[in-house]
Amino acid sequence: MVDKKTNQLKNILQSSNLEFLMEAHNGLSAKIVEEAGFKGIWASGLSMSASIGVRDNNEASWTQILEIVEFMSDATTIPILIDGDTGYGNFNNMRRLVKKLEQRNIAGVCIEDKLFPKTNSFIRGDQQPLADIEEFCGKIKAGKDSQCDDNFCIIARVEAFIAGWGLHETLERASAYYKAGADAVLIHSKKSRPDEIIAFMKEWGNRCPVVIVPTKYYSTPTQVFKDLKISTVIWANHLMRSALSAMQKTVAKIYEAQSIIEVEDTIAPIVEVFRLQNDHELQEAEKLYLKSSETKGIQAIILAASRGLELGELTENIPKAMLKINDKPLIEKMLDMFYERGIKNISIIRGYKKETINFPNIAYFDSDNYASTDELVSLNLAKDKIKGNCIISYGDILYRKHVLNDLMEEDGDIVIVVDTNAQRRTYVTRSDFVTCSRPYTKEYDESPVFLQSIEFKELIPGEKIDGEWIGVMKSTEIGSEAIAASLSALSNHPEFKNMKITDLLSDLIAKGIKIKVIYINGHWLDIDNLKDLPLSSKY
Ligand code: SPV
Ligand code: MG
């Protein structure tokens, strides 16, 4: 069983090792702190106020702060030390604060000896009046007397260095606060070197745990704090500041480009958001409590039987789907993308060096005649998987996530993705060229596009071509039925063993089945040829 948060915080403060608290300012950042391995969280007043767009001057009311820390507490199992500023008033406000914090499972509060409304210590610090020592001691006592859990911690923060009163005043205050019942003292300094802290620790000895916030003396090696026998270091605002920088960079790029394409691969994937929200737990709970809600899985079938002879010795021991692109096999990149999109029922048709394709949780179909047969023979092996919502994809292509997302979101019983730039790879002569009901236009045109013809062939100069099929298609239940029926009929054809998916699509068109087209411009690649490889490093 997880130890109570109050006990955990007390242990941190009393530990003989140097311990660390990491700043968080909302439920998400709190979770990130816990996942990183920190033992405790600093709910920073500066970061919480900044993240809601107000100043660190008690502009947010104490109950608004309480709401934030409640979310943080609910999202985590490690203790939270809340930055309680001055206690939001006098001893009486402090008593109520402690009660309310305990109700929200907050492990401790740090209060500073300034006056309400406070100002951040790094702004006009030396003009800030300090609280009367006796009055502040009364506040500490009142807090300690009102806590229900013996291990709830109250930390007294001494601002005498910040306000320019020096070592003597700092020691006097720290000593008084400790005697008044504080579980630890926080000695704050705004100097760029830890001199004030070093001077304090020399005089203070071991009287009670000392907490520091080295925001300004950040270059000090952590070993110095260990040697000084500091109890706990607070990294006070670094998640808020890193989020801020990341947001500024992203927003500038999007504003400039009037598009989100370029940022997509530089930001957290949506599934990471779901993971941090613990969507998995809800899914499990739904199975338990909402039995009817199980969703129908999407099937994905990946054709990866061929060697890729054109790639020469690179495919001597592995099929081209296993070629490493930036350290990951091509097909694994595709699997990652499918998983990220929640597509988990995946079948792979293997052939050449089949034993090298061996990822977990995949249904494998082996085309042992891969060398003398073509795509439809491979696809036919997985014919029972062509049902419901289904994706059929070549295993040797790479495309950006948004291409898959667009495909998934497009309605239509059968949908294929077509690159309008058919002559993109001048060194490739034969490919899956298409003509459509209308060409791609740079004008905004929402009218649907349908496939009229598709053929694996050479491009004849001057011929009307609307683009190149990139090798991925999606079907609904109705579309999958049509595909399965066509595949079954074609399997009796004398030429079946030489047939490609393009033949299947042509057969569907001939039967009057509408195949919808999504036009894209680049953002994909197929690996047919040694010349394709340098381009793949961007994926
Ligand atoms: C905070 O994180 O809000 C603090 C530490 O109080 S400091 O900003 O250094 O005052
Ligand atoms: Mg603060």
Image (tube, grey):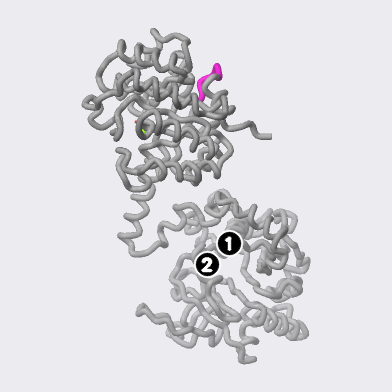
Near-viewer residue (359 or 413): 413
Q: Which mark is residue 341?
A: 1
Answer whether residue 17 is magenta in the image: yes
Residue pictured at 52% horizontal, 22% vertical: 13
Q: Which mark is residue 450?
A: none
Relative to 72, is 506 above or below? Answer: below
Q: Secondary structure at mark 2?
A: helix
Q: Which mark is residue 405?
A: 2
Q: Quadrant of the N terminus?
A: top right
Question: In the image, residue 44 lies at what x, y percent?
Answer: 41, 36
| First-in-chain label (1 vs 2) | 1
Q: Please state the total of marks drawn on the protein image.
A: 2
Near-viewer residue (230 or 495): 230
Q: Main secondary structure of the magenta part?
A: loop
Residue 27 located left or right of residue 393: left
Answer whether residue 201 is magenta in the image: no
Question: In the image, residue 313 lies at what x, y percent?
Answer: 62, 55
Asked if one can make out residue 275 in the rendered structure from this viewpoint, the answer is yes
Relative to 186, is 527 above or below? Answer: below
Q: Tell me if label 1 and label 2 are in contact, CB under 8 Å.
A: yes
Q: Secondary structure at mark 1?
A: loop
